[in-house]
Amino acid sequence: MKKVKSPEELKKLKTEALERLYGKDKIRVRVHMGTSGLASGAKEIYDFMRLELEKRSIDADVIGTGDMGYSFAEPTIEVKRPGEVPVVFGNVDKLRADAIIEKYIKNGEYVDGILPANYRSI
Amino acid sequence: MPKEKMQIMVCGGTSCTGNHGEAIIDNLRLELEANALENDVRVVRSGCFGLCAIGPVVKIMPGDTIYTKVTPDDAKDIVSEHIMKGRKVERLLFKDNVAKKTLSTEKELASQKKQIRIVLRNCGVINPENIEDAIAHDGYEALARVLTTLKPQDVIRIIKDSGLRGRGGGGFSTGLKWEIAFKNKSPEKYVVCNADEGDPGAFMDRSVLEGDPHAVLEAMAICGYSIEADKGLIYIRAEYPLAVARLKTAIHQAREYGLLGKNIMGTGFNFDIEIRYGAGAFVCGEETALIHSMEGLRGEPTVKPPFPAESGFRGKPTNVNNVETFACISPIILRGAEWFASIGSEKSKGTKVFALAGKINNVGLIEVPMGITLREVIFEIGGGIRNGKKFKAAQTGGPSGGCLTEKHLDTPIDFDNLTAAGSMMGSGGLIVMDEDDCMVSVAKFFLEFTVEESCGKCAPCRVGNKRLHELLEHITKGKGTLADLDRLKNMSLVIKDTSLCGLGQSSPNPVLSTLTNFRDEYEAHVTTKKCPSGKCKDLMEYFIIEANCVGCTACARVCPVGAITGERKEPHLINPSICIKCGACMEKCKFDAIIIQ
């Protein structure tokens, strides 16, 4: 536990957290696990990705997050390959998750269900 | 050919697909085949890029190049120039005439996208159960800045200058609310977060709490510092178990890290937050009822004044803000009031999260700048009406709001325009209805909800809404008269004028607005006793067209009540006195012989 005793310590903690999260440019998978996502099976996809990526010896961070708001296409996951912009896939079932690992994560080949970012963030 | 495999992405959004998107895909594939490249270059259809105004959009990877306003004929140039020679097709790149620049990549084109994520900035980005993820994404930085460099009055001025208005429904100036609470001196004050999201179809508060709970905690602490309160309470409905669990984790972690509790970040400021559970009553979204519920009393509203800012929780000055309002605070502090005020319309600043629901393709949450039109929301971002049906109306403000129709499609959506159109912003639920929806039934549905949710304290709301509902029931059963329509209107106005709280004051809105915008439908129900949309069961009759019926007996076999009779290979007949109008026969008939009259 790190107690933040001053604004400077918060800044330091931020730098450390950024380094831990993004310092190493490796494969990162975000599974959107809010109520909409979970109701559509996001937990299964989360477990699948963790297990299968490890099984297939792919070094990746798998993170559970809240929903992005794409309720019409849940479960959704975001995959970032090193040096590339992240890509969000919708309507992910185990079959598609498998294709995402084999085609997109391994070779950068797109699979169906891509949801481009239709927004800008601050 | 470059070594890295090339891929072409074609936007599969409704707008682009409608502009020959499929033909673009076909032509691209044909061109690739003609050049024997079909195994090297993949063409995929994606979701919407949010660039509908300049679509159809085609993206080429690697390189992130975006071509805009592409026609099927452009496939040839894209393949022969870009794919084969690596040269961009200049004429298809987007030219920003204002900035006099060519924007060729998706990153550069972000400025052209309609949605801006301020409230939802971290939703889907951070792990909400790890406070360090939040800190990495600017979490608690605004609080640190406030505590070390600003006086309470400064913070209030920034919030006032930003033009932020309450996102829970009323649209009251947040800065002003804070100022009033600040000016009412008391050793004991409270900051309350209203997470009692009650509008049917709205779920933006839930998503924020599930995706980025720290944004709310931080903003509550900032509010506490500004109004000189050291205690925060989050009133959340127990039917949001995941949001509750993530909030609990977030509060626990924030305390551990010294970002809540005593002497926050060593600045001497104390602020702690507790959760209070609601049982899911709609009226408890009203701030006085909410406060009573938190005090352990019945969730009933009381007359304002006194406003909570004077006498709220336990009789102490209390500031109540909605989740979405709080989620706007930190970015305003970090980026400044001018930045926030530069987004949105003249009197409604910033963005608004809408929950799109109903007969729309892309059901879900969107965050758009205030002042966007309904047309952009429904037909571009929302992907249009489901199954290609015709748009009829959109209900904003839930059961307290009204409907917007085709004539409102190009009205900029903000607090004041919606009120002028006879609706309201509400919490941001947007329920879309198509040609198949009966507006009298829609009004009845919302009234059913308010009748159920009325707390019963004041007669106009308790009795009046019930009577209104009975009248509507009457009309949908074909027993209404033209005089009933006037009665509906009069009673609605009396209920609005005489109810104690916002629930009763707004509950007749769906009736009034459908009555104004769809009077012809009401009239059809009472004069010709017909429901134009074929939704009101009592006003319709299933009927077999003799000429189309081949006597296959399929309808008679599926009818659950034996209302259909007839010999094999002879036209059948429906007995209307037995028929329960379930529609099973119509679904089963392969010869389009059964119609609704």
Image (spheres, coloured by chain):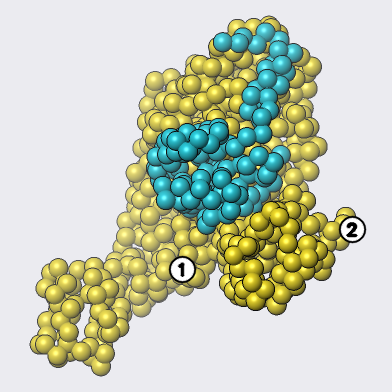
Sequence order check, earlier mark of 2 and 1: 2
In the rendered image, which quarter is residue B547 located in? bottom left
Cβ atoms at labels 2 and 1 below 8 Å apart: no
Instruction: Name the amino acid, label 2.
Output: Lys
At which x and y percent is residue B44? 58, 62
- Rendered yellow, the chain in question is B
Name above or below for residue B254 compared with residue B84: above
Judging depth in this view, the residue of B80 and B55 nearest the camera is: B80
Residue at 39 percent across and 20 percent down: it is B296
Q: CA distance from mark 2 to mark 1?
A: 40 Å
Q: Residue at x 72, y 18 (%)?
A: A11
Mark 2 falls within which chain? B
The residue tagged 1 is B387
Residue B86 visible to the viewer: yes
Question: Residue drawn 57% across and 62% down?
Answer: B45
Instruction: Label 2, secondary structure: give it.
Output: loop
Residue position for label 2: B100
| Foreground: disc 2 or disc 1 | 2
Residue B248 x, y percent position in the rendering: 47, 21
Amino acid type at mark 1: Asn
